[in-house]
Amino acid sequence: MKTRQAYRFAVDPGPAQERMLRSHAGASRFAWNWGLARCTERYDAEGRWYSAIGLHKLWNAEKKTDPALGWWAENSKCAYQESFRDLDRALADFVKSRKGQRKGKRLGFPRFKKRGKARDSFRFGAGVMRCSGTTVTLPRLGTVRTHEDTAALSRKTGDGSARILSATVSRTAQRWFVSFTVEVERDIPQVPAHPGTAAGIDLGVKTLLTAVDHLGRVITVAGPKPLRTSVRRLRRASRAQSRKVKGSANRRKATARLARVHARVANVRADALHKATTELASRYETVVIEDLNVTGMISNRKLARAVSDQGFGTARRMLGYKTAREGGTLIVTDRWYPSSKACSACGSVKAKLTLKDRVYQCDQCGLVMDRDVNAARNLLKLAASGAESLNACGGTLRPRPARHVPVKQEPGTVNAGKTGTAVSQGTAAA
Ligand SMILES: [Zn+2]
């Protein structure tokens, strides 16, 4: 079956290519702002805005007549076109969010993108997009050297098992990246390699993750040492930046440094998560993780927490597609499921548990256990109930691309008796 996957490579452009990358990012930003201004004008006059196609037509007419837009031909037409598409989507998302048809944080009206403030990014949706072992080839830009090996993707495109659909080019802290969206032909096993196996996973603040499997084994992934060092460096860079006078050259330098450290932490964490999630998804049929209100969490001011929350979204996404391609199942609990506050032995729920409480102590049955292990054990319980409910539905759920099965729980209950109805809700939505 066909699935979509992203391949991201850091690139090493030459000076001329770097100028072109900046020019394209500028063109993309310009097109967004230009389109947004046209949409706002029309909305004020007629109560509606332009679609991406409408903007594209308008742009094609105006770029030839307005001498101030004479530079348009310096960049690929994709840079403009894809920005209009993004704007179209942003406007549609805004309307959906206002009507309550969109999950997550309420979205504001799209805003103008400021140079230096907005992220440098643009996309190619058509044209020559290729990669060989050490290079990528893009429309207009030609062949750009990559910082890392691209052989894994070039092998797949070479034998026809993968097709590049689009390429997004972006800059993070002075480094340019190309991210290909690729359609991959993949054999999804009809039967998972290890049927009947399950693991509950608690994504931690101190440790990368703690898992408990169906045999009761505890697996702790501490996270690589560079990650812990980086978090320390991040804290230092963040403090240094906040001390500099706003608008000063020193502030700008400190901000750039902070961005570099942030990018490094994210990379190290993503690497570690890739290793851990690949391993877990291949070893267990069912994997259970808790849901967190990620959008709400990012605003948390505590640094370590904020960093681990970013990793949380990444981990959930990775586990989602990795379990799916192994023929397994990922169960994401409802975010009110008290995985940390409940006792994994007797099921009683604590009223309060702070992040500082590293050891779980049950007042009812006297259980004393590492906090993360206790949470992972509670999550594992849902694997059993979730799997039973799936079988009760007739076991017709396999194969399916991404199987996020939300297990709804009432706040304060531990008994996963309600999962039957919840799973069918999840399947209906999937
Ligand atoms: Zn207890």
Image (tube, helix red, strand yellow):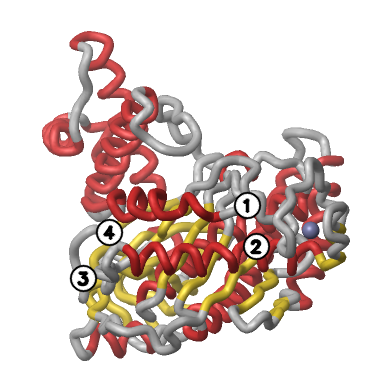
Is residue 41 left or right of 250 when viewed as pictured? left
**Residue 76 screen position, x and y as percent:** 25, 55
Residue at numbered disc 1: 414
Q: Label 4, label 2: how many angstroms apart (C-alpha)?
A: 45 Å
Q: First in sequence: mark 4 or mark 1?
A: 4
Mark earlier in primary sequence (2, 3): 3
Q: How far apart, in angstroms, are the residues tagged by discs 3 and 4?
A: 9 Å
Which residue is denoted by mark 3 in the rendering?
Answer: 128
Q: CA distance from mark 4 to mark 1?
A: 49 Å
Q: Secondary structure at mark 4?
A: strand
Depth order, front residue of 400/140: 400
Q: Quadrant of residue 21?
A: bottom left
Note whether 125 is above or below 53 in the view shown. Answer: below
Whether 34 is drawn above or below 347: the answer is above
What separation in Å lies between label 1 and label 3 (alpha carbons)?
Answer: 54 Å
Q: Which residue is mark 2?
A: 378
Tell me the residue that label 4 is attached to: 124
Ligand 1, image quadrant it occupies:
bottom right
Nearer-the-camera pick, 391 or 149: 391
Precedes in sequence: disc 4 or disc 2: 4
> In what quadrant of the picture does the N terminus appear?
bottom left
Front tag of 4 and 1: 1
